[in-house]
Each structure stands twice: as C-alpha cells, then as structure tokens.
Image (cartoon, grey):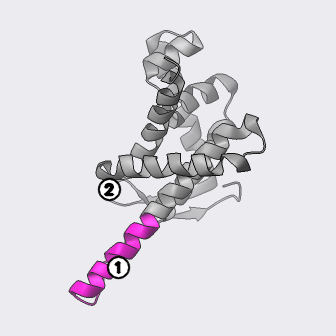
Amino acid sequence: MEDRPWHAFAAQLRGFVATRVPAQDVDDVTQDVMLRIHKGLGSLRESHRAESWVYGIARRAIADYFRERGRRLRRETDLDSGDPAGPLPGPDAHEEVIGWMRPFAESLPDGYREALLMADFEGRTQRDVATRLGLSLSGAKSRVQRARRMLGEQLRACCELHFGTDGRVTDYERRACRC
C-alpha cells in the first residue's frame, strides 16, 4: 500500500480545511489546495520547510475561498435588492488571527508544541498523539489542553480579540506587534 502516506497527508489537510470553511465546501477547498500543491511543487526550495509551505498554500486557498464567496454574495445581493444585508464573509479578522496560530504554536516548549501541532494543526486524534509521543491517552489530552491554554495566553498577550455570536473573531486590537 504505497499510497497510504498520501492518504494520511490528504486526511490531515482536509482536517485543517474542515476547521475553517463550511462543511459543504471542505472537499472543494481541499481539492483546490491539492491542485495548488501539485502545480507549485517546483517552487518548493527547502524540503525541510515543506509542511509550512503546504499549510501556507492551504491558508491562501481558504482566504481565496472566502474572498470569492463574498464576491458571489455581493453580486447576488446587488441583483436581488440593490443593498447588502450586512457584512459579507471574507478573509476577515478571524482568518488573519488563524494565520498567527502556527508561529505562536511553534514557540511553545517542545512537548507542548509537538502535541498541539499534531492534534490541532495536523488533525491527528489524541490517541494517535499519545502513541507518537509515548504518553497515556489522558497524558496526551492533558498536554494538548495545556498547550492550548499556553497558546491562548500568548494570543491574549498579543491582542484583545472580539468575537461574534458564532464564535468567530470579528475584530482585534493589538497590544504587541508580535502577531
């Protein structure tokens, strides 16, 4: 089964996309990311940075998805009534803040960084995290939760975030310029 690593990679990428776009569009956006990766392979200069390169492509594809979705909604609104019915979704504060998460996560202490990256950025189960890090399942869960708290503290030190009723970041005020 030589294609298994490819399937695992695609599943991780799909998990990353699924946390950022509506469920009905996850497969389309993931396919767009895979196509962009294939087309851009020649531009990857440093193979040790492949993961960052891939997730950068994914973030740009997600931003493009929201940008196009906003344009489509604007056109539909213009045709229907002539005036928009409120703010349109797009690459907004929420997507911008998501873009800061990986650099913050990579600055965590080793054990916490590894657990968080596997669970939240690669989409691995906590059981898989436990196996890979040689921890019990409860130990892995605890480590991921602590890492999330540490990440939240870093983010709160950087910015004051404002959330909408749907839990998405609607705006932020910077406290420090690290983000």
The residue at 71%/59% (across/down) is 177
The residue at 50%/24% (across/down) is 3
Asked which secondary structure carries label 2, the reply is loop
Q: Does residue 175 appear in this view?
A: yes
- Verify whether residue 83 appears in magenta: yes
Residue ID for mark 2? 166
Asked which secondary structure carries label 1, the reply is helix
- Horizontal relation, residue 166 to residue 19: left or right: left
Residue span colored magenta: 66-89
For the residues marked 1 and 2, what is the alpha-carbon distance in whole angstroms? 21 Å
- Give the main secondary structure, helix, strand or loop, of the magenta stretch: helix
Write down the quadrant of residue 166 in the picture: bottom left
How packed mark 2 is, by other alpha carbons closer than 10 Å (few <14, some 14-19, many 20 or more), is few
How packed mark 1 is, by other alpha carbons closer than 10 Å (few <14, some 14-19, many 20 or more), is some
Mark 1 or 2, nearer chain start = 1
Q: Nearer the viewer, residue 49 or 167?
A: 49
Q: Position of residue 34 (x, y in %)?
A: 51, 45
Q: Position of residue 9 (x, y in %)?
A: 52, 32
Q: Position of residue 167 (x, y in %)?
A: 36, 53
Considering every residue shown, the one lying at the far bottom of the view is 82
The residue at 72%/39% (across/down) is 49
State the quadrant of the C terminus: bottom right
Q: Nearer the viewer, residue 78 or 5?
A: 5
Considering every residue shown, the one lying at the far right of the view is 46
Residue ID for mark 1? 74
Per the rendering, the mark at residue 174 is none
- Horizontal relation, residue 100 to residue 70: left or right: right
Query: In this picture, is 176 found above or below 130?
Result: below
Residue kind at label 1, given as amino acid type: Arg
Residue kind at label 2, given as amino acid type: Asp
